[in-house]
Image (cartoon, rainbow, N blue to C red):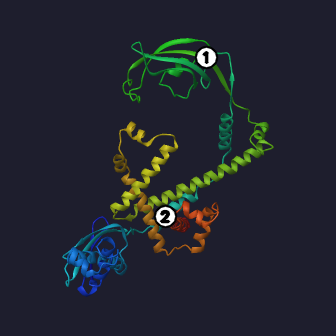
Amino acid sequence: MNVSVKKLPESQVEITVTLAWEEWKGELDHAAESLAKEVKVPGFRSGKVPRGVLEQRYGKGAVIAEAAEHAVGHSYPKVLAEQKVDAIGYPAVSLGKVAEGEELIYTVTTAVMPKVVLKPWKDALKKINATFAKGSDAVEEKEIDEELQRIAASRAKSVPVEREAKLEDSVLVDFTVMQDGVLIENGKSEKHPLVLGKGVFIPGFEEEVIGMKEGDEKTFTLTFPAEYHAKHLAGKPAQFTVMLRSVEERQIPEINDEFAQSLGNFDTLEKLKENLRNGLGEEKKAKRKEDHRAEILDALVGLSEIEYPIILVEQELGRMLQEFQNQIQGMGFDFATYLEQTKKTEEDLRKEWEPQAKKRLAANLALDTLAEEEEITVETAEIEEEMNKALQYFKSIKDAEKDMDLERLYSAVQGQLRNEKVFLMLEAL
């Protein structure tokens, strides 16, 4: 077997393989067996048609062509192993002349895992580490007070009041919206809840409600914003008639021992503050770690030279698109509606996201390269221990196999643990 490998742009290779007739003639019998299972010949059971009968009925060329395909299928994996080619995706195969008694030549074009060339990186990461070492996870009293105010505001109660409506009040209103004397679509509502100051209505609406009392009614004109989602209304004036049904004042509880006790197992306000201090400290620590690692990755990406295979970029864009769809649906929106409203297509999003997809790829490939260069590995026992955390919720391995791909889980856990070790090594510089 004679093999030549030629590098192509975009992390592809062209592999030309030449098989002498002696190397591939044995495939004729395999080809005949394969064809015999697919065809029906009167007088013979399925799979038991002799090669000679097949050649007479369908021609010797059909058997030879099938044999050539078998030869490619059997020799190609050996070629990849011998040439140490890390092929990815589906290869494009081109067969040369196929004839009995002659050598078989075929050419395969395939994408390969890109080689990452990392420029000297240690000094750059040492500087990043030195900067982050100066940071602190300490929580200031001001931050605790702000968190207490946030919690108290979230537990505010609405109490009916007999006075003019003002900012931050909760009100119920009836309203109609007319344009040229005609009620617009969805332009009428009764007992509509509204928190003044939230800015959920078009500009000017809430300001008109401020100062009204229960039972008051008023009519005023406002202009819809130029970027309003309903294009037929955008930039046009309309007449609003509003009747105020009720006014409620938000009463925020006083922050004291009693307030702390209402939140759980806190005897005093000081104990609540201590709990918040620990929680905020952990959040700060996690955020600083996340920022630190993001800066490390940015530095590694900037120091990496990579030829991006189209197939890997497309796969990464597919993952990004799926993640985005999940986010949109998680917020209660329909992805198709989102595309319609933004006047974009999936292809538009892919083009916009391509630089980010390449950056994500570069980050992962740089970590892979560092793990290889620094000989960072993960023991099987470590992987299995981490996998067991995910599998503990299943009654048995068979149950787990029904809901997940264990091989993929193994690979994912291995990658996560290895990356963690790489980061720990980098952060220790």
Q: Earlier in the sequence, mark 2 or mark 1?
A: 2
Q: Nearer the viewer, residue 424 or 46?
A: 46
* Label 2: element kind: helix
Callout 2: few (<14), some (14-19), or many (20+) C-alpha neighbours within 10 Å? many
Q: For this view, does 1 lie left or right of residue 267? A: left
Q: Nearer the viewer, residue 329 or 296?
A: 329
Q: Nearer the viewer, residue 292 or 136?
A: 292
Residue 4, percent from left and from top: 26, 79
> From what the image shows, is residue 417 above or below residue 180?
below
The residue drawn where x is 55% and y is 60% is 403
Q: Which residue is mark 1?
A: 245
Callout 1: few (<14), some (14-19), or many (20+) C-alpha neighbours within 10 Å? some
The residue drawn where x is 35% and y is 81% is 82
Say which of marks 2 and 1 sits in front: 1
The residue drawn where x is 78% and y is 40% is 261
> From what the image shows, is residue 254 above or below residue 52?
above
Q: CA distance from mark 2 to mark 1?
A: 63 Å
Residue 408, percent from left and from top: 50, 65
> From what the image shows, is residue 425 above or below residue 274?
below
View extreme (bottom): residue: 22
Identify residue type, mark 1.
Answer: Arg
Q: Which residue is mark 2?
A: 125
The residue drawn where x is 52% and y is 59% is 293
Residue 288, percent from left and from top: 57, 54
Identify residue type, mark 2.
Answer: Leu
- Rendering quarter of residue 257: top right
Residue 177, percent from left and from top: 46, 18
